[in-house]
Image (spheres, coloured by chain):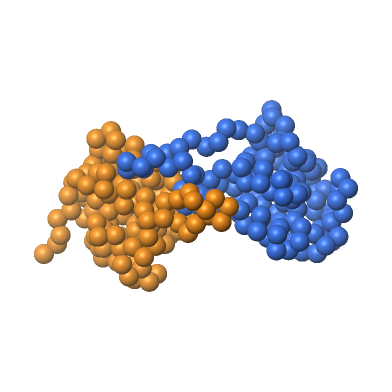
Chain colours: A blue, B orange
Amino acid sequence: MDGRMPGRRVLAVVERGYRGALDKQFFDELYLATELHRQLGGLDVLLRGTAVTYALDAPPPPALRIGDRVVDTVTDPRAGLRTLLDADVGVWVEEPALAVLGSPRPPLPGVRLAREGEVAARWKDYRMVFFL
Amino acid sequence: MARQIPHTDVLLTLMGAPHAGDQVTSALRLTQALLERGAAVQVWTCGYATLLTRRGQGPDKPRNLADWNRSHPSLPGLAEELLGAFPDRLHWYGCRFCSDDRGVTEHLPQVMLRPPAGYAANVAAADKTLLIGVI
Protein backbone atom coordinates (compact mmCIF):
# COMPACT_ATOMS: atom_id res chain seq x y z
CA MET A 1 0.00 0.00 0.00
CA ASP A 2 3.09 2.18 -0.37
CA GLY A 3 3.15 3.12 3.31
CA ARG A 4 -0.48 4.25 3.29
CA MET A 5 -2.73 1.85 5.15
CA PRO A 6 -6.39 1.95 4.08
CA GLY A 7 -7.59 2.06 7.72
CA ARG A 8 -10.07 4.90 7.88
CA ARG A 9 -9.63 5.84 4.27
CA VAL A 10 -12.35 5.82 1.68
CA LEU A 11 -12.13 4.26 -1.77
CA ALA A 12 -13.75 5.96 -4.74
CA VAL A 13 -14.00 3.92 -7.93
CA VAL A 14 -14.21 5.85 -11.19
CA GLU A 15 -14.97 3.59 -14.13
CA ARG A 16 -16.85 5.78 -16.57
CA GLY A 17 -14.86 8.52 -18.21
CA TYR A 18 -15.77 11.49 -20.35
CA ARG A 19 -19.13 12.66 -19.05
CA GLY A 20 -19.40 15.93 -20.88
CA ALA A 21 -16.44 18.19 -21.56
CA LEU A 22 -18.69 21.22 -22.09
CA ASP A 23 -21.41 20.19 -19.65
CA LYS A 24 -19.15 19.60 -16.69
CA GLN A 25 -16.02 21.64 -17.41
CA PHE A 26 -14.30 21.93 -14.00
CA PHE A 27 -17.16 20.31 -12.09
CA ASP A 28 -16.35 16.70 -12.89
CA GLU A 29 -16.03 13.60 -10.73
CA LEU A 30 -12.40 14.37 -9.89
CA TYR A 31 -13.36 17.84 -8.61
CA LEU A 32 -15.94 16.13 -6.42
CA ALA A 33 -13.29 13.64 -5.29
CA THR A 34 -11.10 16.52 -4.09
CA GLU A 35 -13.91 17.80 -1.89
CA LEU A 36 -14.79 14.32 -0.61
CA HIS A 37 -11.12 13.82 0.27
CA ARG A 38 -11.24 16.96 2.37
CA GLN A 39 -14.53 16.12 4.07
CA LEU A 40 -14.09 12.40 4.62
CA GLY A 41 -10.52 12.52 5.82
CA GLY A 42 -8.62 10.66 3.15
CA LEU A 43 -9.48 9.21 -0.20
CA ASP A 44 -8.03 6.69 -2.58
CA VAL A 45 -9.21 6.72 -6.19
CA LEU A 46 -9.21 3.71 -8.48
CA LEU A 47 -9.51 4.34 -12.21
CA ARG A 48 -11.11 1.56 -14.20
CA GLY A 49 -12.83 1.17 -17.57
CA THR A 50 -12.65 4.14 -19.91
CA ALA A 51 -11.48 6.31 -17.02
CA VAL A 52 -8.05 4.64 -17.08
CA THR A 53 -7.06 6.96 -19.93
CA TYR A 54 -7.18 9.83 -17.43
CA ALA A 55 -3.94 8.43 -16.04
CA LEU A 56 -2.02 8.81 -19.29
CA ASP A 57 -0.06 11.98 -19.86
CA ALA A 58 -1.38 14.15 -22.67
CA PRO A 59 -1.53 17.83 -23.56
CA PRO A 60 -4.43 19.88 -22.19
CA PRO A 61 -7.62 19.52 -24.25
CA PRO A 62 -7.84 22.01 -27.10
CA ALA A 63 -10.12 25.02 -26.89
CA LEU A 64 -13.43 24.88 -28.75
CA ARG A 65 -15.15 27.62 -30.69
CA ILE A 66 -18.87 27.86 -29.97
CA GLY A 67 -20.55 30.74 -31.75
CA ASP A 68 -18.07 33.60 -31.49
CA ARG A 69 -16.75 32.40 -28.17
CA VAL A 70 -13.58 30.41 -27.58
CA VAL A 71 -14.14 27.97 -24.75
CA ASP A 72 -10.86 26.99 -23.12
CA THR A 73 -12.36 25.59 -19.95
CA VAL A 74 -13.41 22.12 -21.07
CA THR A 75 -12.83 19.24 -18.69
CA ASP A 76 -9.17 18.37 -18.19
CA PRO A 77 -9.06 15.10 -16.22
CA ARG A 78 -5.26 15.10 -16.03
CA ALA A 79 -5.30 18.45 -14.27
CA GLY A 80 -7.90 16.97 -11.93
CA LEU A 81 -5.69 13.99 -11.20
CA ARG A 82 -2.69 16.22 -10.49
CA THR A 83 -4.77 18.19 -8.01
CA LEU A 84 -5.74 14.96 -6.27
CA LEU A 85 -2.16 13.74 -6.16
CA ASP A 86 -0.98 17.08 -4.75
CA ALA A 87 -3.62 16.70 -2.02
CA ASP A 88 -2.19 13.29 -1.10
CA VAL A 89 -5.00 11.28 -2.61
CA GLY A 90 -3.85 7.79 -3.56
CA VAL A 91 -4.55 7.25 -7.25
CA TRP A 92 -4.53 3.77 -8.73
CA VAL A 93 -5.16 2.66 -12.27
CA GLU A 94 -5.99 -0.86 -13.35
CA GLU A 95 -3.16 -2.12 -15.50
CA PRO A 96 -5.21 -4.69 -17.51
CA ALA A 97 -7.56 -1.94 -18.72
CA LEU A 98 -4.57 0.11 -19.85
CA ALA A 99 -3.13 -2.91 -21.62
CA VAL A 100 -6.41 -3.56 -23.44
CA LEU A 101 -6.20 -0.04 -24.80
CA GLY A 102 -2.72 -0.81 -26.02
CA SER A 103 -1.23 2.07 -24.13
CA PRO A 104 2.47 2.45 -24.85
CA ARG A 105 2.81 5.13 -22.19
CA PRO A 106 3.37 4.85 -18.44
CA PRO A 107 0.86 6.60 -16.19
CA LEU A 108 1.36 10.08 -14.81
CA PRO A 109 3.98 10.34 -12.07
CA GLY A 110 2.42 9.39 -8.77
CA VAL A 111 -0.30 7.18 -10.25
CA ARG A 112 0.15 3.58 -9.23
CA LEU A 113 -0.61 0.52 -11.31
CA ALA A 114 -2.98 -2.06 -9.84
CA ARG A 115 -3.15 -5.68 -10.91
CA GLU A 116 -6.56 -7.08 -11.77
CA GLY A 117 -8.58 -7.49 -8.58
CA GLU A 118 -5.79 -6.11 -6.41
CA VAL A 119 -7.78 -3.17 -5.10
CA ALA A 120 -11.02 -5.16 -4.85
CA ALA A 121 -9.23 -7.52 -2.47
CA ARG A 122 -8.67 -4.56 -0.15
CA TRP A 123 -12.27 -3.31 -0.10
CA LYS A 124 -12.82 -4.71 3.40
CA ASP A 125 -9.99 -2.57 4.72
CA TYR A 126 -11.67 0.66 3.68
CA ARG A 127 -14.17 2.52 5.83
CA MET A 128 -16.31 3.16 2.81
CA VAL A 129 -16.27 2.21 -0.87
CA PHE A 130 -18.32 3.98 -3.47
CA PHE A 131 -18.48 4.62 -7.17
CA LEU A 132 -18.04 8.13 -8.44
CA MET B 1 -52.90 26.33 -39.62
CA ALA B 2 -49.66 24.38 -39.34
CA ARG B 3 -46.51 26.40 -38.78
CA GLN B 4 -44.11 26.64 -41.70
CA ILE B 5 -40.72 25.30 -40.68
CA PRO B 6 -37.84 26.97 -42.55
CA HIS B 7 -35.83 24.62 -44.72
CA THR B 8 -32.45 23.55 -43.38
CA ASP B 9 -29.68 21.32 -44.60
CA VAL B 10 -29.55 19.38 -41.36
CA LEU B 11 -31.81 18.68 -38.39
CA LEU B 12 -30.00 17.59 -35.22
CA THR B 13 -32.35 15.90 -32.78
CA LEU B 14 -30.92 15.76 -29.28
CA MET B 15 -32.61 13.24 -27.03
CA GLY B 16 -31.87 12.21 -23.49
CA ALA B 17 -29.93 13.81 -20.70
CA PRO B 18 -26.96 16.11 -20.92
CA HIS B 19 -24.28 15.52 -18.29
CA ALA B 20 -24.10 11.79 -19.00
CA GLY B 21 -21.51 11.70 -21.74
CA ASP B 22 -19.85 13.74 -24.43
CA GLN B 23 -22.89 13.75 -26.72
CA VAL B 24 -23.80 17.38 -26.09
CA THR B 25 -20.20 18.46 -26.60
CA SER B 26 -20.13 16.56 -29.88
CA ALA B 27 -23.51 17.95 -30.95
CA LEU B 28 -22.50 21.55 -30.27
CA ARG B 29 -19.19 21.08 -32.10
CA LEU B 30 -21.02 19.53 -35.04
CA THR B 31 -23.52 22.39 -35.09
CA GLN B 32 -20.70 24.93 -35.05
CA ALA B 33 -18.82 23.13 -37.83
CA LEU B 34 -21.90 22.93 -40.04
CA LEU B 35 -22.71 26.59 -39.54
CA GLU B 36 -19.12 27.67 -40.20
CA ARG B 37 -19.33 25.85 -43.53
CA GLY B 38 -22.42 27.78 -44.50
CA ALA B 39 -25.09 25.20 -43.76
CA ALA B 40 -28.51 25.97 -42.32
CA VAL B 41 -29.19 23.93 -39.20
CA GLN B 42 -32.11 23.27 -36.92
CA VAL B 43 -31.82 21.70 -33.48
CA TRP B 44 -34.74 19.88 -31.85
CA THR B 45 -34.40 18.93 -28.20
CA CYS B 46 -36.40 16.22 -26.46
CA GLY B 47 -36.30 14.80 -22.95
CA TYR B 48 -33.79 16.33 -20.58
CA ALA B 49 -32.02 17.89 -23.55
CA THR B 50 -34.74 20.56 -23.34
CA LEU B 51 -32.78 21.89 -20.36
CA LEU B 52 -30.09 23.03 -22.78
CA THR B 53 -31.96 26.28 -23.33
CA ARG B 54 -33.37 26.83 -19.85
CA ARG B 55 -33.19 30.56 -19.31
CA GLY B 56 -33.09 30.46 -15.53
CA GLN B 57 -29.69 28.81 -15.52
CA GLY B 58 -28.02 31.99 -16.70
CA PRO B 59 -25.05 32.33 -19.06
CA ASP B 60 -22.42 31.02 -16.64
CA LYS B 61 -21.96 28.02 -14.40
CA PRO B 62 -21.64 28.58 -10.66
CA ARG B 63 -18.17 29.70 -9.70
CA ASN B 64 -15.27 27.33 -9.35
CA LEU B 65 -14.13 27.45 -5.73
CA ALA B 66 -10.64 26.52 -6.87
CA ASP B 67 -10.48 29.18 -9.60
CA TRP B 68 -12.76 31.92 -8.39
CA ASN B 69 -12.21 34.57 -11.04
CA ARG B 70 -12.53 32.41 -14.12
CA SER B 71 -15.93 32.22 -15.76
CA HIS B 72 -17.27 29.01 -17.22
CA PRO B 73 -20.15 29.20 -19.70
CA SER B 74 -23.30 27.23 -18.98
CA LEU B 75 -24.88 25.09 -21.69
CA PRO B 76 -27.73 27.60 -22.13
CA GLY B 77 -25.04 30.26 -22.38
CA LEU B 78 -23.34 28.32 -25.17
CA ALA B 79 -26.65 27.75 -26.96
CA GLU B 80 -27.20 31.49 -26.83
CA GLU B 81 -23.71 32.08 -28.23
CA LEU B 82 -24.55 29.86 -31.20
CA LEU B 83 -27.94 31.47 -31.77
CA GLY B 84 -26.41 34.94 -31.55
CA ALA B 85 -23.57 34.15 -33.96
CA PHE B 86 -25.76 32.51 -36.60
CA PRO B 87 -29.18 34.14 -36.24
CA ASP B 88 -30.28 33.52 -39.82
CA ARG B 89 -29.14 29.92 -40.26
CA LEU B 90 -29.66 28.32 -36.87
CA HIS B 91 -33.14 27.51 -35.62
CA TRP B 92 -33.70 25.93 -32.22
CA TYR B 93 -36.86 24.02 -31.31
CA GLY B 94 -37.79 22.32 -28.07
CA CYS B 95 -40.41 19.65 -27.45
CA ARG B 96 -43.14 21.31 -25.39
CA PHE B 97 -44.23 18.08 -23.69
CA CYS B 98 -40.69 17.18 -22.61
CA SER B 99 -40.05 20.73 -21.48
CA ASP B 100 -43.27 20.90 -19.43
CA ASP B 101 -42.65 17.42 -18.07
CA ARG B 102 -39.34 18.63 -16.63
CA GLY B 103 -40.52 21.97 -15.35
CA VAL B 104 -38.56 24.09 -17.80
CA THR B 105 -40.88 27.05 -17.76
CA GLU B 106 -38.77 29.60 -19.58
CA HIS B 107 -36.40 29.16 -22.50
CA LEU B 108 -34.02 31.44 -24.33
CA PRO B 109 -36.11 33.87 -26.39
CA GLN B 110 -34.89 32.40 -29.69
CA VAL B 111 -36.24 28.94 -28.84
CA MET B 112 -39.56 27.84 -30.27
CA LEU B 113 -41.45 25.16 -28.37
CA ARG B 114 -43.27 22.68 -30.58
CA PRO B 115 -45.76 19.92 -29.90
CA PRO B 116 -44.43 16.37 -30.24
CA ALA B 117 -46.89 15.80 -33.07
CA GLY B 118 -45.16 18.56 -35.02
CA TYR B 119 -41.83 16.78 -35.22
CA ALA B 120 -42.52 15.30 -38.65
CA ALA B 121 -42.81 18.79 -40.10
CA ASN B 122 -39.31 19.58 -38.86
CA VAL B 123 -37.96 16.37 -40.35
CA ALA B 124 -39.66 17.20 -43.65
CA ALA B 125 -38.03 20.64 -43.65
CA ALA B 126 -34.51 19.19 -43.39
CA ASP B 127 -32.48 17.47 -46.07
CA LYS B 128 -30.86 15.23 -43.46
CA THR B 129 -31.86 14.33 -39.91
CA LEU B 130 -29.51 13.08 -37.24
CA LEU B 131 -30.81 11.66 -33.96
CA ILE B 132 -28.30 11.83 -31.15
CA GLY B 133 -28.90 9.94 -27.92
CA VAL B 134 -31.89 8.08 -26.58
CA ILE B 135 -34.68 9.55 -24.53
| Residue at the (71%, 45%) spot, across then down | A86
Observer able to see residue B134: no
**Residue displayed at 84% across by 56% down:** A6
> A116 or A81: which is nearer to us?
A81
**Position of A105 compared to A3: left or right?**
left
Q: Quadrant of residue B116?
A: bottom left
Q: Is residue B114 left or right of residue B20?
A: left
| Residue found at the very far top of the displayed protein | A104
The residue at the far front in this view is B69
Quadrant in the rendering for residue A115: top right
Residue B80 location in percent, x, y?
31, 52
Q: How far from the left and from the top, in percent, is residue B35? A: 28, 39
The extreme left residue here reads B1
Residue at position x 52%, y 37% in the image: A61
* Residue A79 seen in the current view: yes
Q: Is A50 placed left or right of B29 in the picture?
A: right
Left/right of residue A71 with respect to residue A121 in the rendered view? left
Asked which quadrant contains residue A129, the reply is bottom right
Q: How many marks?
A: 0
Residue A18, given in percent of the width and then of the height, sits at: 55, 47
Q: Nearer the viewer, residue A99 or A110?
A: A110
User: In the rendered view of the protein, which quadrant contains the C terminus of chain A?
Assistant: bottom right
Residue at 59 percent across and 47 percent down: it is: A17
Question: Vertical placement of B36 versus A16: above or below?
Answer: above
Between A79 and B39, the one nearer to me in the picture: A79
Q: Give how far across and how far down residue B54 sits, in percent.
A: 35, 62
